[in-house]
Image (cartoon, coloured by chain):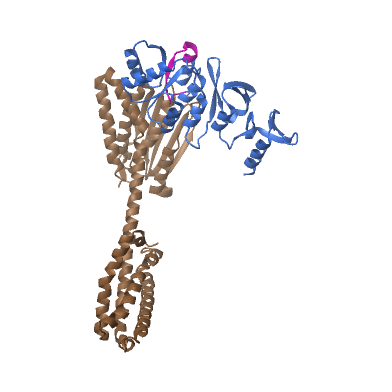
Amino acid sequence: MTAVIADDEELARRVLREYLEREEGIEILAECSNGFEAVKAVAELKPDVVFLDVQMPKLDGFEVLELVEPNVAVVFVTAFDQYAMRAFDAAAVDYLLKPFTAQRLTEALARVRRRVGEVRTTPVDLRNAARTPGEYQTRIVVKDGVKVHVIPAGRLDYAEAQDDYIALRSEGKLWLKQQTIASLEAALDPARFLRVHRSYVVNIDRIARIEPNTKDTWIAVLQDGAQIPVSRSGYTAFRKLVNR
Amino acid sequence: MHPIFQNWRVFLMYLAAWVPLGAILGLLISATGDLNAAETAAVAAPVTVILAFICLSPWYTCRGLPLRSMNAKNLLGQHLLAAIVVAGGVLLVARLAANAFSGLLPGLDQRFRHASPVLTAMVTMVYLLSIALHYVVIEAQTSRRSELLAREAQLKALKAQVNPHFLFNSLNSISALTAIDASRARAMCIRLADFLRVSLRLGERGSIPFNEEMELTRMYLEVEQVRFGGRLRLDEDVDPACSTCQIPALLIQPLVENAVKHGIALIDEGGEIRMQARREKDLMRFTIENPFDPDAPASRSGIGLENVRQRLEARYGNAARMEIQVEPRMYRVTLTLPARES
């Protein structure tokens, strides 16, 4: 079994390496000290398991999780984070609490072995569950080949659902990400982003005007001229938000 | 509602205490008015029951007229007025009772008149005593509550102080070092223990000299330097004239913790935390700056800084202030506070 270690603290990586080297049949492919490196290493080396610290430079552990292939097993390694622990429990992803014993790591590996080949579902919702109540995502990370692109929430114009993906429109460019529109909606500040339609989430600051279309539908015209369908419930929600 | 009603046992005990009081009242009435046992009971029983309840009313008047709210003369006047009204009311009840029973016990109403002055004096005294007791109870409650608030604030400071993240990450560093370098692991254990001990001790004190706070800050940073290695660099420039200035305990430590957590920890190559302290006549100025990555993942923050601001305001009012400057890659917090030596 192959593994990648991602933690910004050298000593933390050393413990993991020490324990993993004692295990049978484990090969460490790479050690990464930030989130960008972790995404790159996982994309290029395709390990079976990645050990992810939650707090890291560049990208945090949750952002890395969103960007790695869903068939790579992820074991979170963290010191203390009540919301994150609750989220791990709910999503049944294994996690190690620092400091941990070699025995505990062996157990985590056994769990990973049992689940090899299993495809993870909805990694993005794990992030939503791990968030402090009332706190929203200030940026969206997308993968562009092996590179990572960060879209600050304020620069997102709108997102459109396309099958299993969402298309994110920002500064004239279009980015694709594997995520549901509902989980994106849940991650963004509801005072700034609105689900105006079953398939659309819009940045309210970008709306120039809303025009009636048919009897029960409207069209939102954005500042750059883009037109977005607005449903009856989307229109009601919009009225409620602006009149507040 | 009066706290005595919150527990029926206490209330029953209170009523029981009125039995001897009623008996004394009865004895006095009986002696001064030359009444027999039945006659005494006919008057003393209703008076005692009514008095028992009236003596709970100062709970409301005492809270309406707190001891420190107005001058003593005014306070005394108000309560005396209340006492006279109460005495008058109770006397009226006693008279009515005497009149009502005078059919059964002839001459009771006439003879009771001799006892009236003694009864009035007794009632006034008992009522004033009850006022005094209520003030004692209310004072005790207030001081207990403020003590509780103070302890809560202290606990909060300690909680902010010994951040669980810091503690568990330090333990993890020790865990790593045991296999790599046992003596460094031991040194780290001792540093961590020193830091915890000193922060617990300082947390109990309101004010400490600036140099003691800086000593604690250094202990904290030494532990973090083991964890972050070469990524955490320090520069300290402290005016010796600041060292004896008194500052609220654990005021600076949260700022240093923020600089590590939101600055250094989120930068790949780390950076330098700079601390500077200057004394300008009767003011002291402390500045801490750290580099930060504007593109770093958002980290939860603000609570530590808000805490520092509130503590400054609570202690110094407008005489102290906290300024935050955010440059493209540099975060700077400046505290300006009165330089007091004691």
Count up the numbered dots.
Answer: 0
Tell me the shade of chain B.
brown
Q: Nearer the viewer, residue B291 or B195?
A: B195
Check the rendered structure and report the hue given to chain A.
Answer: blue
Indicate whether residue B57 is drawn in magenta: no
Residue B339, placed above or below residue B13:
above
**Is residue A60 in view?**
no
Residue A45: % across, % down: 47, 11
Q: Quarter-wise, where is residue B76 in the image?
A: bottom left
Q: Position of residue A73 (x, y in %)?
A: 45, 18
Is A45 part of what is drawn in magenta? yes
Q: From this viewpoint, is residue B280 visible?
A: yes
Question: x, y (%) of residue A21?
Answer: 33, 13
Up-down: is A5 above or below B114? above
Q: Residue furthest front?
A: B104
> Which of the 4 image quadrants contains residue A167?
top right
Across and down, in percent, residue A56 comes to 43, 24
Report the quarter where the N terminus of chain B lies.
Answer: bottom left
Image point (33%, 57%), residue name: B141
Which residue is pictured at 60% across the width and 21% down the height? A175
Left or right of A12 on screen, residue A204: right
When asked about the image quadrant of residue B195, the answer is: top left
Residue interval drawn in magenta: A41-57
